Amino acid sequence: MPPARPASGRQNPPAEQREGRPRGTGLILSRPEDFAALTRAAPVAPHFGDFVMGMPAALENTVAALQAGASAIGNLGQYFTFRLPGWEDDVGPTEATVEALALLAAQPQEILVHSNLDDGFAALFADLACSFGAVLIERYVVEDLIGGRIAHCYGHTFSEPLSRLAFQRAMAKMPGRWETPGSMVYGNTTLYRDAGVDNYGALASYLMVDLVAQHLAPTGHAVNPVPITEASRIPDIDEVVAAQQVGQRLAERAPDWAALMDLSAADRLAEQLIEGGQLFLERVLAGLAAADIDVRDPVQVLLALRRIGARRLEARFGPGAPEAGRSRRRPIVPTTEIRDLERQAQALAADLGDHDRAAIAQASLTACVCATDVHEYGKILIEETLRQLGVTVVDGGIHAEPDQVARLVGENNADLVAVSTYNGIALDYLAAVQGALAQEGLTPRVLIGGRLNQIPEDSNTSLPIDVTGDIDQLGAFACTRAADLLDHLLVLANSKNEKKTQDE
Ligand code: B12
């Protein structure tokens, strides 16, 4: 069984720089002894999946994980997208990651580098062929350049059964296919809603695909049943056990399902993924070389990819044909999440009556939209909705630092700041943003949505508590639904339009 995702906010800066830094959600392993103690807690092979690679302390974390006996260490996917709050340097974490990768490659026993694709760029690509290309790019860096072994994980955002199966079959079919097994197929976490038992339906729907896929063409990926409370909070132990029990029962039933499957559609898609992924790899490497980046140097390649980011990589080098008049390409195999966000935004905007839409358009509003961490879907949904309504969007980025948000608000005279947050720092972050805005004498309306919770300062349980009711004390507005945005836009638009009329 794959373990829970160990994570740590304070563990990841080098040890001497941890004091006083913000804590996110997740376990904190402060010393190498903690890695060893965790390993000894149960008679299972340890897998240090998250927040080891890709972080400023990648090397010291990797040493601790190796000393604790880990044979699969990650998470290279996080290198591309995760940042520690307040940590702006990207060269140090890149060098530390390459040193850690080299250390793993040099071990006398084979150690797997684990990479969760959804933690990296795969969650943001609109084309699944680019996600498969990410597998090939990471394999190029780890195996061809550094001489290590990489095992990939995927699944959080793979919500269509057919393309989920096709991705697994593409991995199984790759020419010169992995001599190494995959690490795990992660549960389809984006499928969960609220915390109801109906989520067991979601769990069974993706797990059966994964189990049957492994039965038909084993790639060595462990399957991962995610607890049904995923959408609301970090699960407790009973919920973890219950999901594993459901998974166990499904695993017993899975072999009988294989006879029901016609694999031709999945195999056609798998071929497209392989072909498109290879083209993406070739184009990315050629593009980097054309920009004078040494494609034999892993530090240069990794840093360039991270700085370019998912959307620009896909737009420049994706295998799909360019879309006329747009800065993106037509996906070969569309991913579900990005497409669904666009549809949700259209539906939200369409909910407003003509009169309200006209009022918002007339007000010429500007909104600065940002996220506090890697979770970007809330931000994308809000941005898309704003664009549909003719509001000018200023991109505050992800991992947005409060003083930069205030600077952007000032420079663009923004009427609104829309924050999306998920990493258990809602109140502290909001207080910092309000402080930075006040320092500049700025008073935009501040909205915050996502997971409005906070880890208590004096707790090491890693369980955040809900702070929705405290948001207004900081002069901001808590938003539990994207639709709340519309009410605030109308208030802003009506008062701006009224003022314009008075001034005339
Ligand atoms: C997708 C996802 C990821 C993806 C993100 C991909 C990406 N690049 O965006 C990946 C795999 C990378 C990821 C990573 C992690 N995740 Co995550 N993730 C999720 C997941 C499944 C969906 C969240 C999401 O984007 N939903 C889509 C948005 C559009 O919908 P929504 O969240 O319901 O938001 C609604 C409203 O809140 C509102 N809204 C949102 N923002 C805003 C803003 C404004 C202004 C307004 C008006 C409205 C609004 O609009 C939405 C529609 O109504 C949730 C669980 C779940 N099923 O919800 C966990 C979850 C958010 N993740 C969680 C965790 C712990 C992590 C990790 C720490 C795990 C790890 N160990 O690595 C890391 C994050 C590390 C970090 N640095 O913070 C926790 C958060 C815990 C908490 N704070 O209580 C959750 C709840 C899972 C859990 N049960 O533990 N995750």
Image (tube, rainbow, N blue to C red):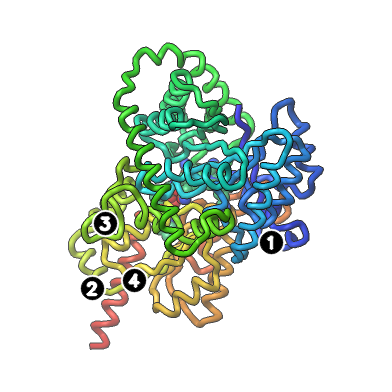
Q: CA distance from mark 2 to mark 1?
A: 43 Å
Q: Quick one: label 2 or label 1, which is nearer the N terminus?
A: 1
User: Which label was assigned to residue 492?
Assistant: 4
The quarter of the rendered structure image containing the N terminus is top right
Q: Amino acid at mark 3?
A: Ala
User: Which label was assigned to residue 21?
Assistant: 1
Work out whether residue 372 can be spotted. Answer: no
Q: Secondary structure at mark 4?
A: helix
Q: CA distance from mark 3 to mark 4?
A: 16 Å
Q: Quick one: label 3 or label 1, which is nearer the N terminus?
A: 1
Q: Quick one: label 3 or label 4, which is nearer the N terminus?
A: 3
Q: Relative to the observer, which residue lies in front, 321 or 154?
A: 321
Q: CA distance from mark 2 to mark 3?
A: 15 Å
Please name the residue that numbered disc 2 is placed on: 362
Q: Secondary structure at mark 2?
A: helix
Q: Position of residue 221 (x, y in %)?
A: 54, 28
